[in-house]
Image (spheres, rainbow, N blue to C red):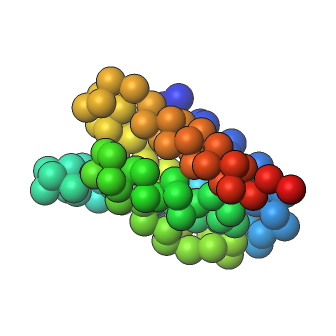
Amino acid sequence: MKIAIINLLVVATLLSFAGCAGTSDLSSPVAYRRGTRDGKEELKKGVLAVESFGLLAPWTPTYVRILKERYGVEDRIVTGCSVDNDIVGHADGFNTVTKRAITEKYGKDVFAEAATEARSEYNKKNKS
């Protein structure tokens, strides 16, 4: 549940700063359940993945590469800024299941680690 709340807060913040089109509800319960089901199915197949959407940070390609190369995690960017309740709900449900499993597998928050490293690499390359 903690991961789900953090995901929603991050999405809401990104949407508000980016001026992206979204909805005020931010989640569909039906889509959330479908997302948790789909996340469990992917894990059963041995697939480690998360769903992302919204305005991409300039360091996103590095973040995606680190997740894939180091941890075998696919970051599926499902849409940009134009989201609806179904997209947010599905991604939230999917990520709640898969992020928990991935964190348990590696014993740490690989997403925060990859993001920190990706931002750092980007900042080093783009110092003015």
Q: Residue at x 69, y 49 (%)?
A: 124
| Left or right relative to 90: residue 21 | right
Where, by quadrant of the figure, is residue 83 drawn?
bottom right
- Image quadrant holding the C terminus, namely bottom right
- The answer to whether any part of residue 33 appears in the image is no
Left or right, 120 with respect to 32, comes to right
Question: Left of 108 or right of it: where is 101?
Answer: left
Q: How many numbered circles does the render carry?
A: 0
Residue at screen point 39% across, 26% down? 108
Q: Residue at 22% of width from left, 56% of height from top?
A: 47
Q: Pinpoint residue 84: horizontal percent, then vertical percent.
A: 63, 70
Q: Given the current orientation, which residue lies at the most extreme top position?
A: 107
- The front one of 82 and 107 is 107
Q: Is residue 96 above or below residue 15?
A: above
Using the rendered image of the protein, determine whether residue 20 is visible from the camera's viewpoint. yes
Q: Is residue 48 above or below residue 106?
A: below
Residue drawn at x 33%, y 53% as measured from the top left = 69
Give the quarter of the image for residue 31: bottom left
Residue 13 placement (x, y as % from top left):
77, 49
Q: Position of residue 107 (x, y in %)?
A: 33, 24
Closer to us: 99 or 35: 99
Camera-nearest residue between 50 and 91: 50
Residue 6: x and y in percent read 60, 37
Q: Nearer the viewer, residue 49 or 11?
A: 49
